[in-house]
């Protein structure tokens, strides 16, 4: 994995924020924030504006005049986004507890949406937004604001800029503005919004650029947006994502809702369906359609074959289009349904670094796969890699001397894929090449620095993929791929260092020096090429995509790159084959980015953009670390609670194992994976093919730690703490009605038809006898929609 912070080489391109031309947004009510502006975040040249304390800023909108600009997001929300308003003219709010008044005129509002970002790097800034109602009640939502820029697009914003200004130059990392939508109390009149108080420049400040309210519908049920995707159904029909809100005072239940789309030359091939939608809730549903071109569409919502609501959309561009290198085009690619529904994958970090297999122990542990870099960059070596290397291997050893000991002698690909399936994972991602440049696949004429030429002298990736196809064909197969190589001299023209200090993480593209003898270390197997990107990077990605048939390209450390052209070709080829493939956020371009990739991290609230958190079973290493004691590895209970937390917020968990150099997997990892897999398979209905709950992701209080998932037919309450006192108390507006059935999943017959009550938004489920003791790790309660 990438360690620390790096800086991206110039991408040499400009892009204005995407505009959504497919959606009428007459129910969106942007607020006038001009009186509250207290910061200038957009500039026309370096140093003009001071979004943060370093006099850095967003680039001004390239082709827009001064003044308010209407912007519509992917969710159908319209904002008045000022952008650049002229010299020394504020254009956003630094949140300091301001109260924004809202007119009482009109209908009750269903939700409030914010365009926001934070002005520090590498960490989120949290703050509570308080909504104040006419009856003197309030509701509070946490605004979790992401950094406005970061190397690697770990999290992609609703607005993406190709660069940002420092105080004296242009930095070609992308900068972002994010969207947050919060449900309001159903039926109540909103009178004001109190922003968070975040004024500490060290901890970071939340900036708000726009606020918009969504009006409730006269019918109760309302269509917020209809967004044509580039996804398709089993018969090849295009999928349109429709967002429905319930701003009424009654739950949709019984036969539910049918959603169809009509228009000239457009037909519904498969209608969308929602069985339960209660007041204040929102759901996304897909409708399969036929047709192409710019069309006027009508979304029709019916109940018991009677139309109860419809909404028209003008000039909607529909049809599955050819993929090109245009950034607007590539940004439309999304993670496929199989990835969204899989929830759990296994990461495998295995390579030459597994021979020393050392990264110290907590609290001084670092990524063991960075062994070579840390031993040759002493200023960044907080874990004493240098001392361990000298004491264990002596001063004359070079990193490539480890090649013969990377034997894979105990590597059994069938055992690996069987373990992955037993763990309950639906996909895996193996490191085909890490930053040390040693490839575990046949890299053709791009390099001889591979496992076919040295060490095992076999194609380790092919063996694993072949075993998966034969023994676990349901597993999707993914390939981790490092964009740069630390010490490959061909990378030199693109080399980078994050900060102007010796300890900074870097991918220099300069031959490493032995830290004891100061002699240059060999870069065994290197082939001279004219250009690293065109002659090494892109051909290797092509090999993995076409010759190995990967389903997931999982890039890392993306800097200068050729991803756009690769992705366009690969997406087109996959579609012709009827395959849906996906690519992560670390390839060096924000626009080829199907899912975000936070590392050793999670969120507190659901995220609209699909995300996948990656971390090791080791507390802080991906590669095998012999210094980590067994008791520090993630156990099965922690694995389950981590997975449950992430899927409740629209995330996947990519959990890493680190095999030894001989291909054996530490027994502690095997045991905990299989134990967790047993629980997952007993509760899979609450895990796979579920979605998050719009209204709330969690309830965390004294003695209570709860998450939520849902399907079309049921709602799941997942308690990370064993219910005590014979009952589970859930203080949340659960969508349950009289006539529904409540049960404790996997508790046997006595766990079904549990008694329950729901008063004033507090659900109490009776858990009689020793029933709860029959379950462990996480207690899953199912509300089956029968009413």
Image (cartoon, grey):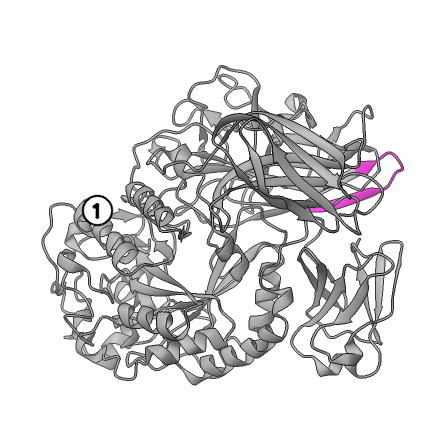
The quadrant the C terminus occupies is bottom right
Q: Is residue 784 above or below residue 158?
A: below
- 570 left or right of 709 in image: left
Answer whether residue 419 is magenta in the image: no
Identify the image quadrant of residue 187: top right
Can the viewer see residue 576? yes
The quadrant the N terminus occupies is bottom left
Query: 436 or 568, which lies in front?
Result: 568
Q: Secondary structure at mark 1?
A: helix
Residue 329, horizontal then vertical, whole percent: 40, 35
Can the viewer see residue 94? no
Answer few, some or many: residues within 10 Å of disc 1's Cα (few below 14, many 20 plus, some between 14 and 19). Answer: many
* Residue at position x 73%, y 66% in the image: 782
The residue where tag 1 is placed is 533
Query: 170 or 636, which lies in front?
Result: 636
Q: Is residue 276 above or below residue 518?
A: above
Query: 172 or 337, which lies in front?
Result: 337
Residue 567, horizontal then vertical, whole percent: 33, 45
- The number of numbered badges drawn on the structure is 1
**What secondary structure do most residues of the magenta stretch adopt?**
strand
* Residue at position x 80%, y 84% in the image: 770
Write down the region rendered in magenta. 132-143
Residue furthest to the left? 528
- 235 left or right of 141 in image: left
Residue 750, horizontal then vertical, whole percent: 80, 80
Answer whether residue 137 is magenta in the image: yes
- 533 left or right of 693 in image: left
* Residue at position x 25%, y 75% in the image: 389
């Amino acid at each position: 994995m990438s360690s620390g912070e790096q800086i991206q080489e110039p991408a040499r391109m400009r892009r204005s924020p995407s505009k959504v031309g497919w959606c009428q947004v007459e129910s969106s009510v942007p607020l006038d924030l001009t009186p509250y502006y207290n910061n200038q975040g957009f500039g026309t040249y370096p140093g003009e504006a001071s979004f943060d304390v370093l006099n850095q800023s967003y680039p001004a909108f390239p082709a827009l005049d001064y003044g308010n600009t209407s912007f519509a997001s992917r969710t159908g929300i319209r904002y008045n986004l000022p952008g650049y308003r002229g010299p020394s003219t504020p254009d956003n709010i630094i949140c300091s507890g301001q109260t924004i008044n809202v007119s009482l005129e009109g209908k009750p509002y269903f939700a409030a949406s914010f365009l926001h970002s934070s002005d520090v790097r590498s960490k989120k800034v949290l703050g509570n937004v308080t909504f104040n109602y006419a009856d003197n009640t309030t509701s509070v939502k946490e605004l979790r604001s992401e950094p406005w820029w970061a190397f690697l697009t770990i999290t992609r914003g609703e607005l993406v800029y190709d660069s940002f200004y420092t105080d004296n130059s242009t930095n070609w990392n992308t900068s972002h503005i994010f969207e947050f939508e919060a449900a309001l109390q159903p039926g109540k009149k909103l009178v004001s919004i109190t922003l968070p108080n975040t004024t500490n420049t060290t901890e970071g400040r939340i900036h708000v650029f726009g606020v918009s309210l969504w009006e409730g519908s006269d019918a109760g049920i309302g269509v917020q947006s209809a967004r044509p995707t580039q996804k398709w159904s089993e018969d090849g029909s295009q999928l349109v994502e429709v967002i429905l809100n319930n701003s009424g005072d009654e739950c949709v239940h019984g036969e539910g809702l049918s959603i169809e789309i009509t228009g000239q030359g457009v037909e519904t091939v498969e209608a969308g369906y929602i069985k339960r939608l209660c007041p204040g809730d929102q759901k996304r549903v897909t409708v399969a359609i036929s047709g192409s071109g710019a069309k006027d569409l009508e979304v029709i919502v019916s109940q018991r074959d009677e139309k109860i609501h419809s909404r028209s959309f003008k000039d909607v561009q529909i049809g599955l289009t050819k993929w090109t290198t245009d950034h607007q085009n590539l940004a439309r690619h999304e993670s496929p349904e199989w990835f969204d529904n899989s929830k759990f994958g296994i990461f495998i970090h295995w390579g030459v670094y597994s021979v020393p297999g050392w990264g110290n122990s907590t609290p001084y542990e670092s990524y063991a796969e960075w062994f070579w870099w840390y031993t040759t960059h002493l200023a960044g070596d907080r874990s004493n890699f240098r001392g361990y290397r000298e004491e264990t291997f002596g001063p004359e050893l070079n990193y490539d001397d480890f090649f013969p000991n990377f034997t894979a002698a105990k590597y059994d690909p069938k055992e690996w894929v069987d373990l992955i399936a037993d763990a309950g994972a639906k996909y895996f991602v193996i490191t085909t090449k890490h930053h040390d440049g040693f490839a575990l696949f046949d890299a053709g004429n791009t390099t001889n620095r591979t496992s076919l030429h040295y060490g095992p002298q076999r194609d380790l990736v092919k063996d694993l993929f072949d075993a998966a196809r034969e023994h676990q064909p349901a597993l999707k197969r993914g390939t981790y791929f490092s964009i740069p190589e630390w010490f490959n001299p061909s990378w030199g023209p693109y080399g980078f260092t994050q900060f102007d200090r010796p300890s900074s993480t870097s991918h220099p593209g300069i031959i490493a020096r032995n830290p004891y003898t100061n002699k240059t270390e060999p870069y065994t197997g290197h082939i001279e090429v004219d250009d690293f990107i065109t002659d090494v990077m892109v051909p290797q990605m092509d090999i993995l995509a076409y010759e190995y048939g990967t389903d997931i390209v999982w890039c890392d450390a993306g800097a200068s790159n050729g991803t756009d052209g690769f992705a366009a070709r690969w997406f087109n080829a996959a579609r012709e084959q009827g395959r849906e493939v996906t690519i992560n956020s670390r390839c060096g371009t924000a626009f080829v980015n199907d899912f975000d990739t936070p590392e050793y991290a999670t969120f507190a609230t659901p995220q609209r953009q699909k995300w996948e958190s990656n971390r090791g079973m080791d507390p802080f290493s991906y590669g095998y670390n012999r210094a980590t004691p067994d008791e520090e590895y993630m156990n099965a209970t922690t694995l389950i609670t981590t997975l449950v937390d992430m899927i409740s917020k629209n995330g996947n968990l990519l959990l890493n194992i680190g095999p030894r150099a001989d291909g054996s997997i530490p027994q502690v990892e095997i045991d905990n994976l299989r134990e967790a897999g047993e629980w997952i398979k007993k509760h899979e209905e609450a895990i796979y093919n579920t979605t998050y709950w719009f209204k709330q992701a969690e309830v965390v209080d004294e003695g209570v730690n709860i998450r939520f998932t849902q399907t079309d037919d049921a709602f799941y309450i997942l308690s990370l703490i064993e219910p005590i006192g014979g009952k589970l108390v859930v203080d949340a507006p659960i969508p349950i009605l009289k006539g529904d059935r409540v049960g404790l999943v996997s508790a046997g017959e006595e766990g079904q038809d549990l008694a329950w009550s729901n008063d004033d938004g507090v659900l109490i489920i009776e858990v009689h006898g020793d029933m709860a003791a029959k379950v462990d790790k996480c207690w899953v309660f199912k509300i089956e929609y029968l009413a």
